[in-house]
Image (cartoon, rainbow, N blue to C red):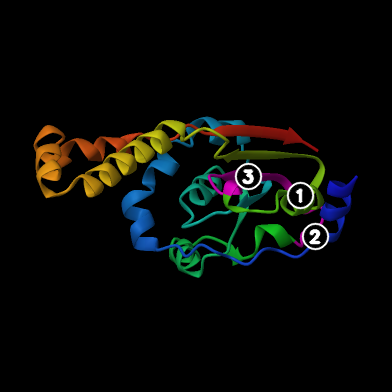
Amino acid sequence: MAAQVTQQTDTAPPKPVQRWSAADYAKNGRFVQELAGPVFGMLGAKPGERILDLGCGDGALTAEIKALGAHVLGVDLSDELLAVARMKGLNVRKVDGHALDFVSEFDAVFSNAALHWMRKPHLVIAGVARALRPRGRFIGELGGHGNVAAIATAMRAVGAEMSSRSRAGPAARATARSTHPASTLPSIASRRPAASRRTARR
């Protein structure tokens, strides 16, 4: 009961904590689009449909939705990423996902790799429900609990080893470097997280 009361009164969007660099995202985040095939297929965008791309970023997938003939609006909080999307000729707007103000406007709401950044999901879902037309659909992909467990475990192991070397002194650190060359460490970051996919119909 207490949790329900908290959600009902907690209606203020959280303050943004992320700043996105369009250049860095283009260089390091393109795998997000490359891995979106299955969830994009679940959207099944049709010509003439009105679709909201929630957390559109630089518009990579927004452009693909548009190419299918749908009327798509992309929304995001990053001015820098939205500027890139506009340069692609896309219809985008700066909107907080916690404060969607659309009412029965869309046949579908689509979100890829963005929902896990939205820290008050009850506000997001309420806004999505309002935005959808009757029989509208919501297709979302997001990071799920435990899907980067292997990476987190590897980082903790490296951290523990480095801490141990620091306490052991210069001679031990030199021995450790020869035993575990630094060139082996980048493999930790080469793993890409799995994702949790959700689809719902209003």
Badge 2 crowding class, 10 Å Cα cut-off, few under 14, some 14 to 19, many 20 or more, is: few
- The earlier-in-sequence mark between 3 and 2 is 2
Q: Residue 34 at x, y = what percent?
A: 40, 38
- Viewer-side residue, 36 vs 182: 182
Residue 166 is inside the magenta segment: no
Give the percent coordinates (x, y) of residue 174. Answer: 9, 43
Residue 26, disc: none
Residue 92 lies in quadrant: bottom right
> Which quadrant, please, contains the N terminus?
top right
Read off the magenta span.
101-116
Which residue sits at x=81%, y=46%?
133
Q: Secondary structure at mark 2?
A: loop
Q: Is residue 74 left or right of residue 89?
A: right
Residue 123 rendering spot, x and y as whole percentages: 75, 54
Query: How many angstroms separate mark 1 from mark 2 (CA)?
Result: 9 Å
Within 10 Å of disc 3 (Cα), the crowding (few <14, some 14-19, many 20+) is many
Relative placement, left or right, of 153 versus 95 is left
Q: Which percent across, then down, holds residue 114?
A: 56, 49
Classify mark 1: helix, strand or loop.
helix
The disc labelled 3 sits on which kind of residue? Phe
Amino acid type, mark 1: His
Q: Is residue 86 left or right of residue 140?
A: left
Task: Say if 136 sits above or below 90 in the image.
Answer: above
Q: Where does the C terminus fall, quadrant-wise?
A: top right
Comparing 105 with 69, the one in front is 105
Q: Which mark is residue 10?
A: 2
Which SS class for mark 3? strand
> Which residue bears the numbered disc 1?
122
Q: List the residue tagged with mark 3.
A: 110
Residue shown at 47% from the left, 65% from the top:
19
